[in-house]
Amino acid sequence: MDLHQLARAIETWASELGFREIATTDTDLSDYEPKYRHWLEQKFHGSLGYLERNVEKRLDPERLEPGTIRVLSAKLDYLVGDPPHPHDIPANDGSAYIARYARGRDYHKVFRRRLATLARRIDDAAPGHYRAFTDSAPVLEKPLAEKAGLGWIGKNTLLLDANGSWCFLGEIFTDLPLPTSTVEPQPGCGACQACINVCPTDAIISPGVLDATRCISYWTIESKASIPESMRRDIGNRVFGCDDCQIVCPWNRFAPATPLDDFAPRNDFDDARLTDLLDWDEQTFLAKTEGMAIRRINYAQWVRNLAVAAGNAPFDAHLVAALEKRRRDAPPLAVEHIEWALSELRDRGRQGSNRKNDSR
């Protein structure tokens, strides 16, 4: 088959592997360079030092993988069930909110395996050099996907299309001169600012610009430090990541459900209670989260996050008891947050008692 036939075949093979869409682009990211460098200069990446390393490789795929002249960008849906509605924004009710992408099997494993399978099939048809990536190297995934025509980078900095943003992105770098995909006009976000308005911490400081140091995902996943008290109440009950900007996005009303069972929630992570999760010791945490993206954080971060969520919950004697029990052997990082949570809950309990007394 010629390269145009191969490109059509790749789309078929990708669909058979569960990908919603795949497209091809060249490696020229010069249009994205000024914005990315300015973002780094503003220190919006916080302590994420890896984002300022290998900048040249991020901006030039050929430097990352010599010989690369084309990038295949693919989407894999991960939403389980029907799209959430704005009334599904997490509430401080004693539950623990875990971002939807992390409730099932680690997407790195699922996506990379399927990309590698696709790369082998392409190589059988047209021998060349292929390398698959899934959030695993200095790759500017969203710019490459946008350039390939898979959507546009929205005001919340996520890649959107007419079917929303509940999807993962992955790439295959190759030296095969495949025809680049036709890029159709995109509808864009228009005047909508739902994502900006809903962000609990005002992390989206302007359309398409995210200050990671204000982002809940940054503090609950990336940071290994103490969460500043000024951030804790705004975090609410989100113990691993945040989906608010996706939940309110109008385009996500049309998001398809994933065809894969891999992303089905484990451990009731779609409806977990803080009291139950606080009961996990480190061995239980490691066993329960094996093979999941939640293992990006360690046990100290996990208990830290649970404590913050507990401190934002309604007063509950069982929750107080769970925190006191966990404090006995909690990692040092978590102890400070447990103490804060206990203080918050006890204050809430006293206020509730006072209101009852006043109404008598």
Image: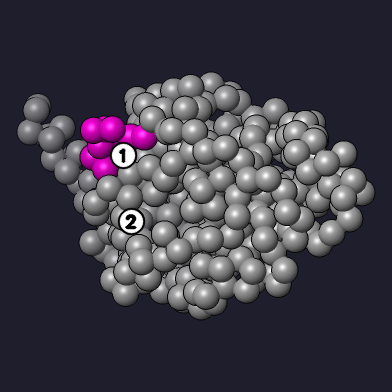
Q: Element under label 1?
A: helix
Q: Amino acid at mark 1?
A: Cys
Q: Is residue 305 left or right of residue 80?
A: left
| Percent x, y of residue 297 | 56, 62
Q: CA distance from mark 2 to mark 1?
A: 11 Å
**Residue at 81%, 62% in the rendered image:** 129
**Circle 2 is placed at which residue position?**
210
Q: Is residue 349 left or right of residue 307?
A: left
- Where, by quadrant of the figure, is residue 256 drawn? top right
| Percent x, y of residue 170 | 64, 50
Q: Is residue 83 left or right of residue 8?
A: left
**Residue at 31%, 55% in the rendered image:** 209
Tell me where the magenta segment starts and ends, as one range: 188-202
Quarter of the image with the C terminus is top left
136 or 3, which is in the foreground?
A: 3
Residue 62 colored in magenta in the image? no
- Where, by quadrant of the figure, is residue 264 drawn? top right
198 or 40, which is in the foreground?
A: 40
The crowding category of the residue bearing disc 1, from other C-alpha atoms within 10 Å (few below 14, some 14 to 19, many at least 20), is many
| Percent x, y of residue 177 | 73, 54
Task: Residue at the far right: name it.
Answer: 124
Q: Amino acid at mark 2?
A: Leu
**Circle 1 is placed at which residue position?**
195
